[in-house]
Image: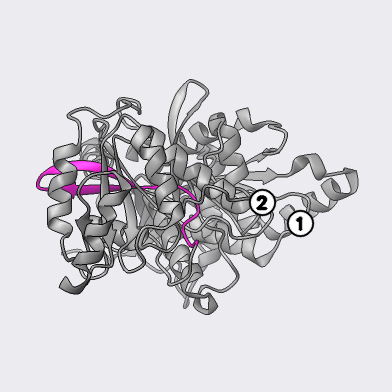
Amino acid sequence: MTGLDGTWADEAEWTALDEVAGAADEGLGGGEPPQPVVAVVGRPNVGKSTLVNRILGRREAVVQDVPGVTRDRVAYDALWNGRRFTVVDTGGWEPDARGLQAEVAAQAELAMSTADVVLLVVDATVGATTTDEAVARVLRRSNRPVLLIANKVDDERLMADVAALWSLGLGEPYPVSGLHGRGSGDLLDAVLKALPETPREAVGASGGPRRVALVGKPNVGKSSLLNRLTGEQRSVVDEVAGTTVDPVDSLVELDDETWRLVDTAGLRKRVRTASGTEYYASLRTRAAIEAAEVAIVLIDASEPLTEQDLRVISMVVDSGRALVLAYNKWDLVDEDRRYQLNKEIDRELVRVRWAERVNVSARTGRAVAKLAPALRTALESWDRRVPTGQLNAWLNELVAATPPPVRGGKQPKVLFATQAQTRPPTIVLFTTGFLEAGYRRFVERKFRETFGFTGSPVRISVRVRERKPRK
């Protein structure tokens, strides 16, 4: 095998290449100490998500001028004056809610019960309502700090209305404008003063749990699967498609290992034509995939594969994340549907034959225990690197048996290869000419046949180098 300058590469050169490639193999951060939790609660449309964005100093929570946009409890990392804490945004709390709204209220109650500090947000322009009084009664009975936030106080004219909120019995109200930022600094100072030195629950594994994104089209069962895995009603589930808007983080114990699962909004057909809420939710879903290490793509096994399913899979592959395909609602699949599904997979999913497939039912719990081994396999492949010497010994035999096709009257030569990085594994081929896309796919297929890499995308990159003329 020749080097870039046309001379034979020796072991020292392979070792140097290994060191260069290995420099990209640093791990994704270590374990972090648990952070205290601040829950933001209140009735619908009082500006909770706007206030959360103001606390974070960035637009994270989905905001729209319609009540009930936030439905799950959603956690975000916040930082103020060098102190880190977690902010949990919740859906609007209604004491007598039914159906979907009752589920939303339950999420808010759970957030209140697990938080270290609770922020009750009241719309100062409306004043204390019967719902606000009901929430205040619940919070007065809790044994945790509660800060009363009078939101939408954009100027001094509302200060008299703010004073009236003393009647809720939660102490002095903090006048704030979540939209314009008025009073937010004083509020954050008060939050830090109320936070305990150590959080209520020390959750999380040392070394940092691996991040898993649950993605798929709307109403495919992502939130149901998350609830099944966590053993609690962690995400709101309803027959209405698109119940989840924000990504929802959960620490889940699977097969004696802690994982961080992120339930995401269902991706619709065309992001550009989505409404305001759907548009921002789709952006959050893309960000959740980018922040994850592996994605579980849920597919409704009881229905034919759709364009949306293929788009979601392509999004994960293009982002370079490890992949597990979970065919949900398997309890609804009969023999005829199984036969049709196998044909659809052979026809439509040629690009991701390397992805491990798990047939599950979030409703019955069927085979959900198989997800953890599939995730481990995918992540092991995603983290793996083939030594340069071993890679080139294999490549020598491959090119000798099947050389690249002639292009423009010349046959390109493959000089050598190295795995430039992991996460995802990226193989760089140094050549004397361009390699056709078909030959690159052939190299990837043969590479997988030899080295495996189940569950991880493998990128084949070509760098064309002209040989230096001999002197």
Measured as percent of width and height from the top left, residue 45 is found at: 42, 64
Frontmost residue, 270 versus 357: 270
Q: Residue at x 83, y 53 (%)?
A: 340
> Toward the viewer: 234 or 358?
234
Residue 468 placement: quadrant: bottom left
Label 2 vs label 1: CA separation? 12 Å
Q: Front-most of 252 and 327?
A: 252
**Element at label 2:** strand
Nearest to the eye among marks 2 and 1: give it: 2
User: Label 1 neighbourhood size at 10 Å, few (<14), some (14-19), many (20+)?
Assistant: some
Which element is circle 1 on?
A: helix
Residue 234 image point, x, y percent = 52, 40
For the record, the magenta segment spans: 68-88
Q: Which residue is mark 1?
A: 344
Residue type marked 2: Ile
Q: Residue at x 46, y 74 (%)?
A: 276
Q: Is residue 401 at least partly visible in the picture?
A: no
Q: Earlier in the sequence, mark 2 or mark 1?
A: 2
Q: Is residue 239 left or right of residue 441?
A: right
From this view, report whether residue 161 is shown above or below residue 223.
below
Q: Which residue is mark 2?
A: 299
Residue 85 image position (x, y, % from top left): 23, 41
| Residue type (three-letter) at the residue carrying disc 1 | Glu
Magenta-drawn stretch, dominant element (helix, strand or loop): strand
Q: Is residue 434 left or right of residue 306?
A: left
Tell me the residue at 79%/39% (across/down). 331
Q: Quadrant of the C terminus?
A: bottom left
**Residue at the right extreme?**
336
Check disc 2: other Cα within 10 Å, few if <14, some if 14-19, many if 20+: many
Res. 218 visible in picture: yes
Q: Is residue 412 left or right of residue 195?
A: right
